[in-house]
Image (cartoon, rainbow, N blue to C red):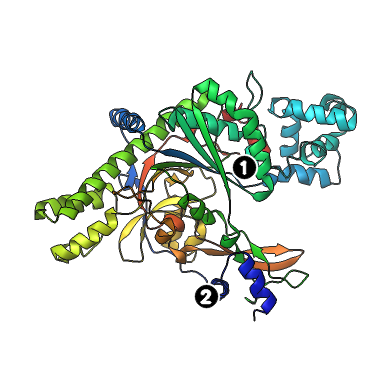
Amino acid sequence: MLSEQDLKQIAARGITEEQVNHQLGQFKTGFPFLKLEAAAAIGKGIEAPTEEERAKCIEVWNQYKQEGHKIVKFVPASGAASRMFKDMFAFVDAPYDAPTTDFEKYFFDHIKQFAFREALCQKCKDNEGKKIRELMDEGNYKAIARQMLSKEGLNYGQLPKGLLLFHNYEEGPRTPMEEHLVEAALYANSNGEANVHFTVSHDHLELFKQKVAEKADFYAKKFGVKYNISFSEQKPSTDTIAANPDNTPFRNDDGSLLFRPGGHGALIQNLNEIDADVVFIKNIDNVVPDRLKEDTVVYKQLLAGILVQLQQKAFEYLRLLDTGKYSHEQLEEIIRFVQRDLCCRRFDIKELEDAELVIYLRKKLNRPMRVCGVVKNVGEPGGGPFLTYNQDGTVSLQILESSQIDKSNEEYMRMFTEGTHFNPVDLVCAIKDYQGKPFNLPDFVDVTTGFISSKSKNGRELKALELPGLWNGAMSDWNTVFVEVPLSTFNPVKTVNDLLRDQHQ
């Protein structure tokens, strides 16, 4: 099925023939659905710390920061903003000239409030010879939309979200990239240094570097920190082959194989190359202006404090197991910690001999750890926190997407739709073991949790293979803890009009 030319193309991407054949096989077999025990809830896998507990955790985190540990803020930022402007692209192509849909009317009625308004007005003057107001007065709304979206204008239809102007300040508007630099200074700096890592697409790497070169010194002076800012790209070796509806390889018009990015799960490879004790992960568009950052900072410190406390306890138990000198009571204490604090249960644990028990406990303690903020479910699309069965028969906490759930199972669908909480992608991770060695993160991926989606290219249908998601199957075999955080910490920008919400003004 694969020609000599195909094999050269595959090798050039750093992929093996075996991997490609395995992926083609996955199109035929599909992926198994996950077996669920329950949706996580307060008291059932989700913690809701009291004010006193919050204060203690924040104190623990601030102490940890002073001890010289390396902390990194990891920001997936490769997404283009094109989906943000879907409605405005439709307006440009529409058979009418004046704003007609509610979305279009709201956009133009509030155009003055966008942080990019001045830059857009300048593009309108440069390219149309008129300001926004003048173009609107003469009914030329489409010219404004074109200047916002097109390459000759602001090029917002093609730029990454991280480089759009989101928020207004007296000193000038800020991009999400800048807001993440500010956040790093406020909760992720250690001894005056703030490490920030952006994963970006190859096409936007130079633009990001330019913007960082322009802005980093300003924020370094403002917050009295030294920034270490780094970038990585999604590796070509994590791309997956596309297939025709009959599961044969999809070929481009020139006969070559089509490879597609494997989704955000591919970033586990990028995360694996980060040298850090603690890593904060948050999406590029989930940022707020300074006036609303207090909750974000408080709860980020809370999550980090909980992580540090859990990790210290796990390390203490691992060192005890290393000595070989422990009582049955101490083993029972470790079991309680694994089951109660780390929410990982094994149903036949009482039947294990001490030697087997120690092997089991060591395996569950000595793995990467993450504390995830979850918010109350307000009907946003996306994943939720669940108690699920793992490959080894244990039950633990996982973040699931709807694609991982058997839609024909009424009980599972009820769990998913009635779940009280939602995953806003708010993670604090510990990725080194108790001896200070980095874990090899790909070892902890559940490869059976990828999924297949339907796409098209040049009008031809194709099947796309998504790798296990970064915070789903890619972190499946991590210790996971869920903590309720307020909705004020979750302010994603899915459409351009979301920037008109109070949280972004």
Q: Nearer the viewer, residue 326 or 488?
A: 326
CB within 8 Å, label 1 to label 2: no
Q: Does residue 119 lie above or below 398 as drawn?
A: above
Q: Position of residue 31 (x, y in %)?
A: 49, 69
Answer with left or right where residue 306 lies relative to residue 428.
Answer: left
For label 2, the residue is: 29
The residue located at (62%, 21%) in the rendering is: 169
Q: Position of residue 329 (x, y in %)?
A: 10, 52
Residue 414 in view in this figure = no
Q: Position of residue 427 (x, y in %)?
A: 43, 43
Indicate which disc residue 494 carries: 1
Q: Quadrant of the C terminus?
A: top right
- Secondary element at tag 2: helix
Residue lying at the far bottom in this picture: please name it.
1
How far separated are the C-alphas under marks 1 and 2? 33 Å
The residue located at (48%, 28%) in the rendering is: 185
Q: How many marks?
A: 2
Q: Does residue 39 lie above or below 238 as drawn?
A: above
Q: Nearer the viewer, residue 22 or 29?
A: 22
The residue located at (39%, 32%) in the rendering is: 301
- Secondary element at tag 1: loop
Q: Position of residue 182 (x, y in %)?
A: 53, 29
Q: Nearer the viewer, residue 406 or 283?
A: 283
Quarter of the image where one finds residue 76: top right
Q: Does residue 271 lie above or below 278 as drawn?
A: below
Tell me which numbered mark, 1 or 2, is placed earlier along the sequence.
2
Residue 273 in view in this figure = yes
Q: Residues within 10 Å of mark 2 (few under 14, many from 20)?
A: few
Name which residue type carries label 1.
Answer: Lys
